[in-house]
């Protein structure tokens, strides 16, 4: 506990100020203090655990009204999936790649490496996509 906060609490205990005054003083002290003390390195940002997709929309088709989709995909699932590709026979990967390319997904599964996935996850950490439209809103982010 810092010295100023202790002084405020002592004044409260001695009856020199009221609890409301003590609360206001402590809040003012917190606003004045820097986020981290000088000389202390900031803590590293925690790694994201989930890729989150939120969709809110208006249902104009005569349904129950507004709708909501909330998808939370564990990033560990992506990591496990990349590791599993090493178990898939090369002939199957070639066929899967062909089908992906036919569907417009330009990914080569034979080139996926766990190291590349970690780079992707690091980049996803900074990803935030917000789409606002008259009929709905879409958000994609990591948490």
Image (spheres, grey):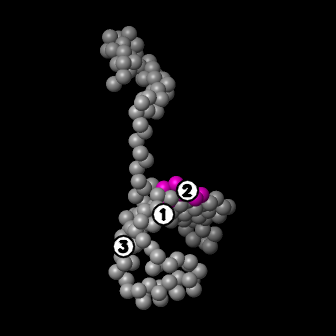
Which residue: 40% across, 33% down? 40
Question: For the residue carrying disc 2, how many other residues have a C-alpha within 10 Å: few (<14), some (14-19), or many (20+)?
Answer: few
In the image, residue 30 sits, relative to residue 121, either above or below, namely: above
Could you say which quadrant of the image residue 48 lies in?
A: bottom left
Would you place residue 85 above or below residue 94 in this image? above
**Range of magenta residues:** 124-130
> Does the stretch in magenta take in 126?
yes
Q: CA distance from mark 2 to mark 1?
A: 14 Å
* Alpha carbons under labels 3 and 1: distance apart: 15 Å
Q: Are there few (<14), some (14-19), or many (20+) residues within 10 Å of tag 3?
A: some
Considering only order in the chain, which callout, 3 or 2, is on the residue closer to the N terminus? 3
**Residue at mark 2:** 128
Residue 76 drawn at (x, y percent): 37, 64
Q: Give coordinates of residue 100: x percent, y percent.
A: 53, 82
Magenta-colored stretch includes residue 29: no
N-term mark: 3 or 1: 3
Q: Look at mark 3 in the image and give the residue it sits on.
A: 83
Residue 131 is labelled as none
Element type where label 2 sits in the image: strand
| Residue placed under numbered mark 1 in the picture | 120
**x and y percentages locating residue 19 in the rendered image:** 39, 20
Q: Residue at x 38, y 86 (%)?
A: 89
Q: Kindly indicate the quadrant of the structure image that contains residue 38.
A: top left
């Amino acid at each position: 506990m810092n010295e100023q906060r202790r002084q405020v609490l002592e004044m409260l205990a001695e009856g020199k100020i009221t609890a409301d005054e003590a609360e206001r003083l402590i809040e003012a002290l917190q606003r004045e203090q820097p986020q981290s003390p000088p000389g202390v390195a900031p803590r590293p940002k925690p790694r994201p655990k989930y890729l989150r997709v939120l969709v809110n929309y208006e249902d104009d088709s005569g349904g129950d009204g507004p709708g909501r989709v909330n998808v939370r995909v564990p990033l560990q699932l992506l990591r496990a999936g990349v590791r599993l590709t090493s178990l898939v026979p090369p002939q199957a990967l070639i066929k899967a790649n062909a089908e992906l390319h036919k569907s417009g997904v330009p990914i080569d599964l034979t080139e996926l490496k766990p190291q590349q996935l970690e780079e992707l996850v690091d980049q996803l950490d900074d990803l935030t996509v917000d789409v606002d439209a008259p009929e709905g809103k879409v958000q994609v982010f990591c948490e």
